[in-house]
Image (cartoon, helix red, strand yellow):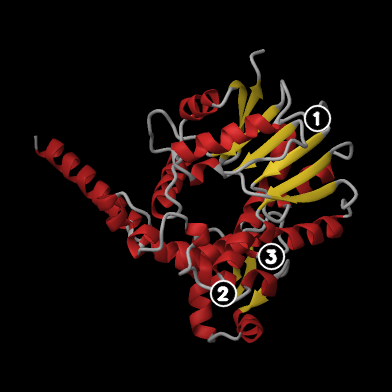
Amino acid sequence: MAELGNLAEGERMCQLASVYELVQSHRITAVIYTAAMLNLAEAIGGETKSVDELANLVSADESALRRLLIALTTLGLCRQAEQDRFAMTDLGRQLDRDGDPSFKDWIIFEGEMLMQSWSGLLDSIRTGKTAAQLRGDGDDRYTAASNPPGWTRQFNAAMVSLTRSIVPKIIAAHDFAAARIVMDVGGGTGELIGGVLQHTPHLEGVAFDLARCEAEARAHFERLGIADRGRFVAGNFFEAIPRVADTILMKSILHNWKDDCCEIILRNCRNALPASGTLIVIERIMPERATTGAENRSCAMSDLNMLRGPGGRERTEAEYCKLAASAGFRLVGTAGIGMFSLIQFRSGEN
């Protein structure tokens, strides 16, 4: 019996240790954010460099920087080649703005804005209200007057880094051969549609979003060399969506909004498409039953981020199908594309 008692006590201590580690996760965010802000990945590049050399390159205290590099090594972002020489790993190169993929702008957004927002999660859970609603700024985070001056700029940069990383997965998961004109609804500065056009030379593309995105989108199309096939159309997807495409893309749009708002967006998409037009929704898919898997955890954390931020939610596949059906769409199929899923719908009865 004593042995069984010791085993039970050992399991209990293991569980306590796990919670102890989990609650310190914010420290990992701080470490990665600090490395990104110091431009460490750019300073190290593809070489192995000494702490002394790096301290001069990034303007940091040598002793403190060495401690940061050791922490990054334990996270798998750096490799300690010798006592005082470090290199970046493949994972760590994602902190480099020129990395492929690069999540540097997302890291900065997470570290400077999202981490602060999450400090008020308790109030959102108690009230069901977003951070903006609790501040008295209204329902729309994206137009809140209290947004810091750099919020929109950093938000857009973060979204670009995330979108850029999944474009190849979208191309691999969906055959655009039958499409002629694809419109990205809520397409911002054209990162997603621009990437799609680069991979599919027969397509024409439209970025549809608020007028404030137009200048940057047009400049982006020029940089990519696709200005002859890519254009920007200004508008509001809650009012009307232009009838200019046979295929509509929407990435990370519906999860921002409650069901009634999603139904309006989807009806406007249906009205914009021809008979048998295609709607491609790219979102995270909530599990019907949550597990401890990394993908489930990532989706659940994103769901709470929607609660705290814009007020929307992550949904199950069945919930997306129900919303789409209310607007006259039927499910064609779903494919996993990393942390996201690509859900294809068809308008019309057949």
* Residue 95 in which image quadrant: bottom right
Question: What residue is drawn where x is 51% and y is 30%?
Answer: 320
Q: Please state which of residues 277 and 289 is positioned toward the viewer in this rendering.
A: 277
Q: CA distance from mark 3 to mark 2?
A: 27 Å
Q: Which mark is residue 97?
A: 3
Residue situated in front as seen by the camera: 74 or 32: 32
Which residue is disc 1 drawn over? 179
| Up/down of 9 relative to 73, above or below | above
Name the quadrant of the C terminus: top right
Mark 1 is surrounded, within 10 Å at the Cα level, by few (under 14), some (14 to 19) or many (20 or more) other residues, namely some
Q: Residue at x 71, y 30 (%)?
A: 273
Q: Amino acid at mark 1?
A: Ala
Earlier sequence position, callout 3 versus callout 2: 2
The image quadrant of residue 25 is bottom left
How many C-alpha atoms fall within 10 Å of the one at disc 3: few (<14), some, or many (≥20)? Answer: some
Residue identifier under label 2: 83
Numbered disc in front, either 2 or 1: 1
Q: Earlier in the sequence, mark 2 or mark 1?
A: 2
Q: Amino acid at mark 3?
A: Arg
- Circle 3 — which element? loop
Front disc: 1 or 3: 1
